[in-house]
Amino acid sequence: MDILLILQNENKTKEKIIQTKMRKLLHLEDILSNMENKCRICMEKEVNRLFLPCKHLASCDECVVFLKFCHICRSTISTVVSVLYCADRDAVLHPPHISSLGYKL
């Protein structure tokens, strides 16, 4: 009988540890999802500048003026492209396949 009680107590302790770790993980996931579209330099404004030729999208319009090299891959920036997002972010993240647009290849 004592062994059963010991095992039950161990399980309760392990469940509490798992719940605590799950809460921490969910909190970290929330933080990361909020940072996903933030400028990698100031971490405040939305990313809206694309570097060419490396194609990294990682800067806002204010921070880009200080850059000569991509801060991700260190390649020389030859062109900076302004990126505009549509109201439906899901459309940007999951664009339609080219075959569904009616274009002939």
Image (cartoon, grey):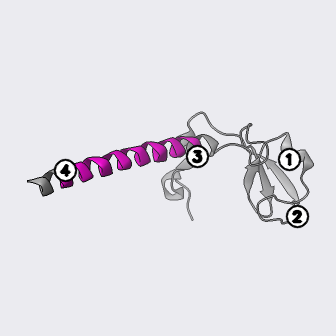
Q: Residue furthest front?
A: 2
Query: Does the segment drawn in magenta span residue 30?
Result: yes
The amino acid at mark 2 is Thr
The amino acid at mark 3 is Leu
Task: Compare residues 73 and 22 and report the one nearer the observer.
Answer: 22
Residue under numbered circle 3: 32
Residue under numbered circle 1: 64
The amino acid at mark 4 is Gln
Q: Earlier in the sequence, mark 4 or mark 2?
A: 4
Residue under numbered circle 2: 76
Residue under numbered circle 4: 8
| Residue depth check, mark 3 versus mark 1: number of the one nearer the observer | 3
The amino acid at mark 1 is Val
Task: Compare residues 50 and 71 and report the one nearer the observer.
Answer: 71
Horizontal side of 12 relative to 63 (left or right) equals left
Magenta residues span 6-31
